[in-house]
Image: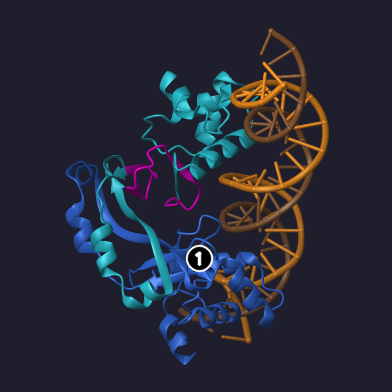
Chain colours: A blue, B cyan, C brown, D orange
Amino acid sequence: MEQIIKKYKGKGFKLTPQRLAILKFLEGNTNHPTAEDIYVEIKKKYPTVSFATVYNTVEALRERGEILEITIDPERKHFDPNPTPHHHIICSKCKKLGDIFVDYSEALRLGLPENITKEYTVTGNHVDFYGVCKNCRE
Amino acid sequence: MEQIIKKYKGKGFKLTPQRLAILKFLEGNTNHPTAEDIYVEIKKKYPTVSFATVYNTVEALRERGEILEITIDPERKHFDPNPTPHHHIICSKCKKLGDIFVDYSEALRLGLPENITKEYTVTGNHVDFYGVCKNCRE
DNA sequence: TTCTAACTTTAGAATAATTCTATTATAGAA
DNA sequence: TTCTATAATAGAATTATTCTAAAGTTAGAA
């Protein structure tokens, strides 16, 4: 908690109790929560919290590069408090997300055809893996 | 057109004028249209067409593996009538999508750590590239 | 060719995720 | 302690997508 406060103090990111609760919930969280997951959790301690606060906060954090927005699930956005570039796998059945910490940048970049590198300045990449998790296999 | 009809005849996919128009619009289309793009186009010829028809049709086509649903744009789904596995790049500014026909499966598979291959049966992959297109660079 | 079951289309309502708005509250700098 | 920019809130609005129920069509069977 002290760490969190120190990290954001004097950085133009106002720390409010709601924001601290969100930061605390996200810290080290590898469950890739949705906005609703965050909202439900924060509501336990701050029953008057609104969705707007959750969305505003995650957007502010995303802008600062503190969290990643994951688009692998077409139903809803998930958030990942680990901003280190990495990849994800989603279970086609239960939608469970897993992290994959492998840097494929080199191989991906080398494979890019010229027509693409001419047309786009490439700034990043993200690999979506699809699969079926152990549970859903039965 | 004859080709399209032949392709779907007797395959349990009823061909209606609306569906034919959608198939014709999609054929060879590399613009990655959204449901709305398709709707607007079909409406020109069939002014009473509804969004439900568009969504029903693309879903039926997706189930048959005839088109791909692309999730790279968090705002909306895009559809790709080329069902060959391939990848995409999106311009962060204007959201223009480009196709990347490179098969990275080997490199991606080899990189997967054991904890993931133990937990998931991997069935596919898709690479999202992010960049800025020529136009948006000015 | 006609019949008909199964499927498709349609308009519009419903749902769900996310964003916006206007007002009130508060963090943190001075 | 005061002040101002920023944040929180409730609730409405927006947008993409799905659902519903009624009416219309397709395509195979008779």
B26 left or right, relative to B48: left
Residue at image coords 60%, 21% = B46
- Please tell me how many numbered marks the rendered image carries: 1
Outermost residue to the bottom: A2
For disc 1, the marked residue is: A78
Q: Nearer the viewer, residue A17 or B81?
A: B81
Q: Quadrant of residue A41?
A: bottom right
Q: Nearer the viewer, residue A8 or B94?
A: B94
In percent of width and height, residue B58 lies at 53, 38
Q: Nearer the viewer, residue D9 or C12?
A: C12
In percent of width and height, residue B74 lies at 48, 53
Q: Which residues are magenta?
A: B71-98
B137 left or right, relative to B125: left
Q: Is residue D22 above or below residue A44?
A: above
Q: Nearer the viewer, residue A109 or A62?
A: A109
Residue at image coords 50%, 75% = A31
Q: Is residue C20 above or below residue B24?
A: below
In percent of width and height, residue B89 lies at 32, 49
Residue at image coords 55%, 42% = B59
Q: Is residue A96 above or below residue B80?
A: below
Q: Is residue A41 above or below residue B32?
A: below
Q: Quadrant of residue B29?
A: top left
Residue type, label 1: His
Q: Is residue B49 magenta?
A: no
Q: Is residue B88 magenta?
A: yes
Q: Is residue A83 among what the camera can see? A: no
Residue at image coords 42%, 74% = B119
